[in-house]
């Protein structure tokens, strides 16, 4: 089925920072939503209740909607929460993906899976779309496992870096907003000076996802920003642009007590630039984008 057909495109994970970003640029009239709670910023698309932790619910939703495209962004994405609840993580991040692909394999539905930089261990200088995965955390492991299933089914995998964006409700916000909120509240933060990411504005991503889905382009894409920055640099530049006085302690990621963290996650965008025309924004562009699109 093509994008112009009546079958809807189904989006999961609409309540996250990415869901907010997609909402800014995709033609919502072709979307149906599946999730646990409908966020305020998606008031109009048809919605269906879906809890990925309940086996069979994804299958029932898919059989009812028969979507021509599924953009699957929902997952358990907090590394600590995954480590604390490994069985639930496996159900939500792996078994639900297996259920999705098994159900839609005979529908001609195109699978687009949203993944993460966390499928890499952070020991290399940077990672290409062709680099073999090597996750450190359970979160990264389950995302890598799901990626492999989607690729075997002929779908697309879009790996994202740290996302920047506003508060989107239910305690969720982009990494920049989390830092700025703390500064505004007068809290002194410790920010890693030795952990590197290539962050991007969530609002920049919609047109690229739209293009992959409309043209049904299989394989792996990276959609990251052009600049590698530490969390400390992110905080300093975000404060500068927001006109706030930085209030940070520079700390080492080695001091972090939680699940293993990948130190250097620099995503290369070679294929997405060549095939999609992705123009990776630098950090200031992404931060400016957020202030423009913030509502
Ligand atoms: N945020 C980042 O910095 C980042 C970086 C790299 C990759 N990503 C990827 O981008 C995607 C979206 O991330 P995000 O940050 O926008 O989302 P998020 O804030 O982590 O929220 C997770 C989303 O998944 C949904 N979800 C979680 N458990 C669910 C369940 N049992 N049943 C149904 N839905 C469930 C949540 O629904 P509720 O609203 O009902 O809780 C929410 O919409 C993920 O695949 C993530 O791996 C994100």
Image: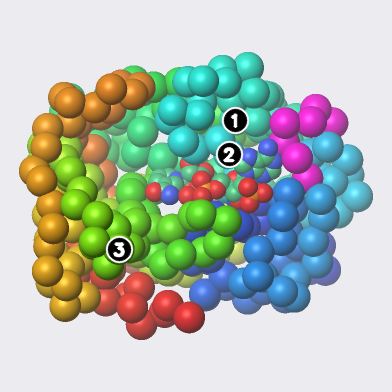
Binning the other alpha carbons within 10 Å of mark 1 as few (below 14), some (14 to 19) or many (20 upward) gives many
Question: On the image, numbered disc 2 is attached to which residue?
Answer: 75
Cα distance between the residues tagged 1 and 3: 34 Å
Q: Quadrant of the N terminus?
A: bottom right
Circles 2 and 1, Cβ within 8 Å, touching? The answer is yes
Q: Nearer the viewer, residue 133 or 37?
A: 37
Q: Which residues are magenta?
A: 50-56
The stretch drawn in magenta includes residue 55: yes
Q: Element at badge 2?
A: loop
Answer yes or no: disc 2 within 8 Å of ligand 1: yes
Q: Earlier in the sequence, mark 2 or mark 1?
A: 2
Question: On the image, numbered disc 1 is attached to which residue?
Answer: 93
Q: Is residue 234 visible?
A: no
Q: How is the image coloured?
A: rainbow
Q: Element at badge 3?
A: loop
Q: Element at badge 1?
A: helix
Percent across and percent down for residue 159 are 41, 44
């Amino acid at each position: 089925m093509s994008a112009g057909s009546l079958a809807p495109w189904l989006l999961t994970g609409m309540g996250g920072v990415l869901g907010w970003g997609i909402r800014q640029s995709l033609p919502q009239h072709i979307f149906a939503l599946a999730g646990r709670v409908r966020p305020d910023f998606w008031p109009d698309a048809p919605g269906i209740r879906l809890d990925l932790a309940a086996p069979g619910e994804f299958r029932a939703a898919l059989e009812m909607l028969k979507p021509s495209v599924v953009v699957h962004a929902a997952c358990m994405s907090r590394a600590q929460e995954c480590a604390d609840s490994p069985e639930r993580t496996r159900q939500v991040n792996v078994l639900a993906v297996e259920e999705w692909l098994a159900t839609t394999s005979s529908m001609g539905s195109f699978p687009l899976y949203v993944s993460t930089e966390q499928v890499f261990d952070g020991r290399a200088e940077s990672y290409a779309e062709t680099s073999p995965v090597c996750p450190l955390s359970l979160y990264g492991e389950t995302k890598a496992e799901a990626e492999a299933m989607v690729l075997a089914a002929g779908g697309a995998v879009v790996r994202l870096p740290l996302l920047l964006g506003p508060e989107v409700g239910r305690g969720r916000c982009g990494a920049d907003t989390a830092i700025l909120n703390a500064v505004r509240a007068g809290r002194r933060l410790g920010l890693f000076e030795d952990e590197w990411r290539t962050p991007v504005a969530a609002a920049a991503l919609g047109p690229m996802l739209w293009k992959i889905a409309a043209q049904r382009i299989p394989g792996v894409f990276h959609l990251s920003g052009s600049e590698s920055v530490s969390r400390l640099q992110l905080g300093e530049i975000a404060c500068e642009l927001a006109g706030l006085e930085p209030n940070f302690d520079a700390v080492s990621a080695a001091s972090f007590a939680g699940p293993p963290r990948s130190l250097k996650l620099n995503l290369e965008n070679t294929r997405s630039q060549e095939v999609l025309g992705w123009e990776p924004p630098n950090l200031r562009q992404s931060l400016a984008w957020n202030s423009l699109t913030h509502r």
